[in-house]
Image: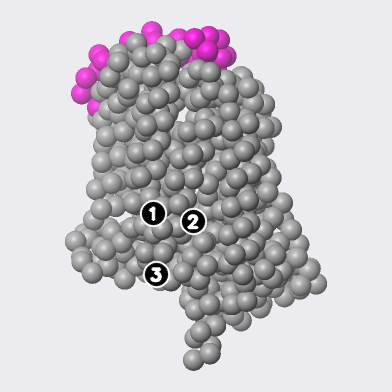
Amino acid sequence: MNALAQQQSPLDGTNPAVNITVFAGLILFTLLITYRASSNRNTSDYFAAGGTFSGAQNGIALSGDFLSAASFLGIAGAIAVHGYDGFLYSIGFLVAWLVNLLLVAERLRNTGRFTMGDVLSFRMRRRPVRAAAAVSTMFITVAYMVAQMAGAGDLVALLLDIHSSSGQALVIAVVGVVMVFYVLIGGMKGTTWVQILKAAMLLLSVSLITLFLLGKFGFNFSDLMQRAAQNNPLGERVFAPGAQYGESALTKLDFVSLSMALVLGVAGLPHVLMRFYTVPNSREARRSVVWATWLMSLFYLCTLVIGFGSAALVGTETIRNAPGEENSAAPLLAYEIGGTPLLGVISAVAFATILAVVAGLTLTASASFAHDFYANVVRGGRADPDSEVRVARITAMVMGAAAIIGGILVNGQNIAFLVGLAFAIAASANLSTLLFTLFWKRFNTSGTLWGMYGGLGSCLLLMLFSPVVSGAPDSIFPSVDFSFFPLSNPGIVSIPVSFLCGIIGTFVRPRSADPADFDEMEVRSLTGIGSRDVVG
């Protein structure tokens, strides 16, 4: 009985009032930074910070934007519970940045102005393509935000020992409200400075906890790994692939699908692509990716140590029985190493991570709706800057409400897995059309619409009828079963479908684009000449 109680309350002895005070102080501090940094005189300031950040600054902000709750909480938990298979998330996320650097970063920065829709509509019919870009951005952003909201609920539920679903729902709602304040007050400039601060705090925290952890084992990583195997029911299977994805041919196929989504999804994430417009030129865009890649390499190496360290010192069963389950591994490890003070610091950093990432996502979605749909579809490119920013702020509030509802529905799922689904949507809806737009001269408006809606629709349909939603004990609706697609991640099907639809659509109406526009776009994407004069 005592053992059970200890599993249910692994943080007995901590003071919730101290944790809440640390959280409140952090929120007020970051809100103050957001307010002081805000400068929203026009749409360029609000959506792209006026292009005033250097490559180094934007690279740090990019790492802060990308290193989400999934990276910190979800991956550490996946490694602690599943071993080697959990680390595959880190490898996928990191390799994805090489794809981003080689294929889209520089060309995107030179061709667009505020959003992905600027690039896709450059040589296409603007209204339908911008509408499609806004729709895909909304779906991707909501999926990504839902994962962050679930992480916030898990983290605070662990610290306050909240087991009830209503209590965790209240936590998620509070996070959503605070996140909307970030966007309404700061715009891109304020949000960027918060992400820079959060990235520095996160990288410093994971580096220190890694050093403290290795110090407990005399800086002998082999001893740490052996202890992790002893405290995991899988034993030494945690060191080899297959513990999570190697039980059958179906699970192996699911892993291939997840890998495709992770590697190809980053180049289609609207909130990552939008960050390249905050730098003044393509050279700084390249530097941004280089900085971000090095910083994230350091971070993901630390998550390997933290994940196995959590299994070694906390134990897999304790992690599984804690509020938040796998997502609680890193905070529980912090408590084991440094007690309440280190737990408070790590939890506050994780909370800041969630707030900064969700704020960036909300800003991206609101910018896409206001700039692509309202200004260019509804108003035909004749919207004044004040109304555009006003619509963006209203959209931010609506997106916040949608993320809160979604976060409550998926609470308890591993957030790294949920982010994998968001990556699948991004790769399915956006990657094919971006690549075809930038590199294929015959690609046209019809192909763009077929590719975006075909990829997005197939991905959402397969997700709806997969074990993620119904038919499994850990589904969103476990009591019903209407699934017919056996894989948890649909990327292996929906990503090729999007490329195929783009090709078919291009040949259905071959005259729906002017080849001369491709030549102009190619010159601009390679040289940056005239890149600030993109038609809005």
Q: Position of residue 510 (x, y in %)?
A: 25, 17
Dot 2 surroundings within 10 Å: few (below 14), some, or many (20 or more)? many
Between the C-alphas of marks 2 and 3, the distance is 15 Å
- The amino acid type, in three-letter code, at marker 2 is Ala
The residue under the point 64% across, 44% down is: 29
Q: Nearer the viewer, mark 2 or mark 3?
A: 3
| Mark 1–mark 2 CB contact (< 8 Å) | yes
Q: Nearer the viewer, residue 8 or 414?
A: 8
Magenta residues, start to end: 505-533
Q: Which mark is residue 164?
A: 3
The residue drawn where x is 57% and y is 20% is 50
The picture places residue 23, in percent across and down from the top left corner, at: 59, 55
**Residue that label 2 marks:** 152
Figure check: 73 above or below 94: below
Amino acid type shown at disc 1 = Gly
Q: Which mark is residue 407?
A: 1
Q: Secondary structure at mark 2?
A: helix
Estimate how packed mark 3 is, as few (under 14), some (14 to 19) or many (20 or more) residues with alpha carbons within 10 Å: few
Measured from the top left, where is residue 381 in percent x and y?
A: 35, 13
Of 121 and 27, the residue lying toward us: 27
- Residue located 63% across and 37% down the image: 33
Q: Secondary structure at mark 1?
A: helix
Gap between marks 1 and 3, in whole Å? 15 Å
Residue shown at the point (63%, 63%) measured from the top left: 18
